[in-house]
Image (cartoon, rainbow, N blue to C red):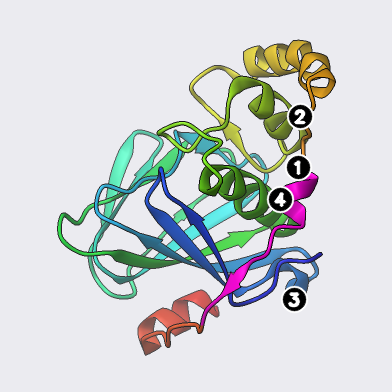
Amino acid sequence: MAIRAGEVYVNPPCRQKIVVRRAAAETGGERSLMDLYVSPGGFAADYHVHPFSEERFTLVRGRLRVSIDGRDEILDRVGQTVAVPPGVTHRFFSACEDEETFAVVAFRNRADRFENLLLRQLFGLADGGQSDARGIPNLLQTALTLREFSDVLRFTSRPWPVQRALYGALAPIARLTGYHACNPALERRPVRTAELEELPPEVALQVNA
């Protein structure tokens, strides 16, 4: 079942909530807009790259620190935008101690696969208590899921050739013990919906460009 606008996904370990603003299914799978809410202390799960896709953050309120290739960008003005090109290591963090940060994230190229990985799989596992304090599943689950979706996300804590070899060795064990790259229970899981917040004009201009 395709992900739809208004659906809500939460990741308690990472202190994140995402409300889908424009689903990839509306754009032929190529572009997705997501309202990202990050509580104080919240973060993206580990440093990572999107090999073929661009990710763009536009601030609505609060403060967001985006680390891009070892350099920090602080978003602290409404409508301020930062883009992460394909293949560049990055991670984001809340930069607010006392309020929630809200940014719109635009993901271009293979957005349908990214939605399935991030929202259905990684957020679904985290919301179900099946990930660690960083929001990352156990090694057997990671071996299948990150191998299946390596075209849209790769963690950078280890070199990719090392990860690929490790995941390849673990994948048969993971399957034998009942793991799935795309957990069917997460595909069928009921999803909450919410009304979308109205965006300030300067943000709407950026995200709809």
> Mark 4 — residue?
186
Q: Which residues are magenta?
A: 183-194
Quote the CA–CA distance across marks 1 and 4. Answer: 5 Å
Q: Nearer the viewer, mark 2 or mark 3?
A: 2
The amino acid type of the residue labelled 1 equals: Asn
Contact (Cβ within 8 Å) of mark 1 with mark 4 = yes
Q: Disc 3 on helix, strand or loop?
A: helix
Identify residue type, mark 3: Glu
Q: Nearer the viewer, residue 115 or 125?
A: 125
Depth check, mark 3 against mark 4: the one in front is 4
Amino acid type for the residue under numbered disc 4 = Leu
Q: Is residue 113 visible?
A: no
- Label of residue 26 in the image: 3
Residue at image x 49%, y 82%?
A: 196
Q: Which residue is mark 2?
A: 179
Q: CA distance from mark 3 to mark 4?
A: 22 Å
The amino acid type found where label 2 is placed reads Tyr
Q: Are marks 1 and 2 in contact (CB under 8 Å)?
A: yes
Residue furthest to the left: 98
* Residues at marks 3 and 1, CA–CA distance in whole angstroms: 24 Å
Displayed quadrant of residue 170: top right
Label 2, label 4: how far apart the Cα atoms are: 12 Å
